[in-house]
Image (cartoon, coloured by chain):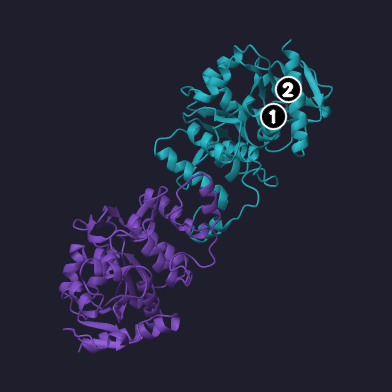
Chain colours: A purple, B cyan
Amino acid sequence: MSVLALAGGVGGARLAAGLARALPPGDLAVAVNTGDDFEHLGLSISPDIDTVVYTLAGLNNPELGWGLASETWAFMAALERLGGETWFRLGDRDLATHVERTRRLAAGETLSAITADFAARLDIAQRIVPMSDDPVRTIVETDEGALAFQDYFVRRQCAPVFRGLRFDGADGARPSAGFAEALADPALEAIVICPSNPLLSLGPILAVPEVRAALAARRVPCIAVSPFIGGQAVKGPAGKIMAELGRDATPAGLLALYDGLVDGLVIDGADAGARADVPLHVTDTLMRGPDDQTRLAREALAFAAGLAR
Amino acid sequence: MSVLALAGGVGGARLAAGLARALPPGDLAVAVNTGDDFEHLGLSISPDIDTVVYTLAGLNNPELGWGLASETWAFMAALERLGGETWFRLGDRDLATHVERTRRLAAGETLSAITADFAARLDIAQRIVPMSDDPVRTIVETDEGALAFQDYFVRRQCAPVFRGLRFDGADGARPSAGFAEALADPALEAIVICPSNPLLSLGPILAVPEVRAALAARRVPCIAVSPFIGGQAVKGPAGKIMAELGRDATPAGLLALYDGLVDGLVIDGADAGARADVPLHVTDTLMRGPDDQTRLAREALAFAAGLAR
């Protein structure tokens, strides 16, 4: 069996961690959004890749939802004293990831190769692949003008009103070799769209033309796990953004966004009355910890397997 | 009164700290070696400038002789886990200096401007100026071939036998604006060559043509404080290197290196019998702490003032 998960940040990483526990190590590939990637302080930062890597390594910070557990902040305090920019918080341990990635990118390595090596060094047996090695940059169009993703998301805390999105570079981007391989794998049995922000985290992945074409031509079930519970996002600004775009943070709103790419949807009991034109699996989708992650992953895999018949 | 000190790393920084306490704040400029500067992990590192800045700010690590007091090493441990290079130790707080300097250099600021701003933010009232804003790189010729300075000094711990030195870029380098201004200051009353490594730390400064010419044409006394005590360097490889070059780690050996640029020499009591063709001031030159630094600085200033008559 081979399963391909598509993930963004925290929610996606949590389900990916569940899938990693539910499947033999070689059977899972996780393709991760890189639209959030940016350059800051001269460093190449890949927030969603790091969240997935740290979470699958068991090193993630569950309180913050990003970064490493037991992190320290001496660098940040010293940077502040020198008058540097501190709106994007970089922990002392986390910083090593960014410095080393930046060095290796400058030396000509791909983000894929660097990510695979970091994952191996952190004893992760699953494949974690960037959606693309070509730069794709999410730009948020707001009532205050176009903002680079992290400017909108972190610096401005999502305060400006969302008007639209574009993914600069996506049209010309190719899926990474590992992602393309996972999509074309003859052993592939299911594709799982994780409960990350459908617009900001999955949007960039689905905007890569070959990815969308491969998903549209899929021969295996593609299921999504809804990030919404009772009309709200579990975490993050997805609910606010859906509302600002005139969309509902509901199963139907999600399916409209995924537009024909999804064969089944896992939704929370709070949304049990939802109407949808694909099969629904209703369960408790809130992942409070590893046990919930593994249970939800197992249910999602069983649901997908049922759709394959 | 205006005093110009020429300094390298730890010994130079210690006397500079003494001079800073011995003089009114506006009266001291410290010109610092940049021949040790290098790029590492994609970061622009200026070891001697940082040692002088940290020491004058009272933030230096007296045990290590470099870096910051109460430093932590979470970054380094994380970098090691990711397979990064760890032979050059970068503390979590110290790293902020390198990341912010690298960012500002890339944005087009000069090393002089960045250094002045860092010094101001760390409440240093004295002027700390790089010897040059043009890149000068110390290359050590050894029995194992030519080595970049930090490769020789840190990675190889000065083990290869020293055959010679060159300062790439020095011929075409200009003194920094602040250094040139201090050299030409009509109020200048003394130049103090601090007890840093004469070959590795002062060598690059003196290799900048306009600096050497200005020192040769000086109208004020230039005195040196010997880094040697009883034929040995207080710290670092100066003694070993002098021996490998067939030179003596003595007052006479030092004067031969400074070749006509020095009007008086401060030496330790252990070398009291030394013969020299310039006036000597014999005292306790070992700087065990701030009190020694200030006392030695006062003695050096008085000695220089006496030579001006």
- Say yes or no: labels 2 and 1 on the same chain: yes
Give the structural element (helix, strand or loop) at label 1: helix
Give the structural element (helix, strand or loop) at label 2: helix
Which amino acid, by three-letter code, is at mark 2?
Leu
Vertical side of B186 occupied by A298: above or below? below
Residue B278 visible in the displayed image = no
- Which residue is under mark 1? B19
Q: The N terminus of chain B appears in which quarter of the rendering?
A: top right
Q: Quadrant of residue B66?
A: top right
Total residue callouts: 2
Q: Residue at x 33, y 72 (%)?
A: A29
Q: Residue at x 50, y 24 (%)?
A: B177
Please report whichever mark, 2 or 1, sits nearer to the chain's N-terminal start. 1
Q: Residues within 10 Å of mark 1 (few under 14, many from 20)?
A: many
Q: The C terminus of chain B appears in which quarter of the rendering?
A: top right
Whether label 2 touches label 1, CB < 8 Å: yes
- Which residue is under mark 2? B301
Residue A214 visible in the displayed image = yes
Q: Quadrant of residue A271?
A: bottom left
Image spot of residue A2 (x, y percent): 30, 78
Vertical side of A212 occupied by A267: above or below? below
Q: Residue at x 84, y 22 (%)?
A: B273
Image spot of residue A110 (x, y percent): 34, 56
Q: Front-most of A307 and A229?
A: A229
Q: Quadrant of residue B21?
A: top right
